[in-house]
Amino acid sequence: MLRDAHLKFTREMSARLVIRSVSESAIRVNDDDYPRSIALTPEAVLGDWCDKPIADLVADDFSEVFDATPEVVLLGTGRTNVFPPRELTFAFARKGIGFEVMDSPAAARTFNVLANEGRRVAAVLCIKR
């Protein structure tokens, strides 16, 4: 015998900050636009991010991000995926922090999913690359 199942879906957002959009001119977090590259956690925007080339990034550039004690860091490299130096990936591994590199729109989507799962995630989102 089949029964009619009535399901109600609700959208629950547990993260305080949600990335609404990423473009070449701004990153929208909640209702605020940031015209520069930024670093953030689900609880706070950590501030403007250095706009040095991805190929020149070193672990020290992420010191403020490391202070937030994330379990994973997402690096959004702009409109295309650009891989950082291998040594940077090794530095994250030595600290026991996951490190994922992708284009900024993909990093924003992944950040929102992980943040709403309650994960300790941080993102660095670059624009205009």
Image: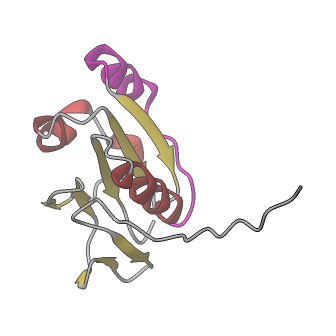
Q: Residue furthest front?
A: 1
- Residue 114 % position (x, y): 41, 48
Q: Which residue corresponds to the image point at 48% horizontal and 61% vertical from the top-left?
A: 109
Q: Which residues are magenta?
A: 79-96
Query: Residue visible at 14% across and 59% down?
Result: 44
Taking the spot 61% from the left edge, 68% from the top edge, the residue there is 7
Which quarter shows the N terminus? bottom right
Q: Position of residue 27 (x, y in %)?
A: 33, 76
Q: Is residue 30 left or right of residue 99?
A: left
From this view, report whether residue 108 is shown above or below residue 100. below
Counting labels gives 0
Inspect the magenta stretch and tell me whether residue 51 lies in it. no
Does residue 9 appear left or right of residue 13 in this picture?
right
Quadrant of the frame with the C terminus: bottom left
64 vs 71, nearest the viewer: 71
Q: Is residue 47 left or right of residue 77?
A: left
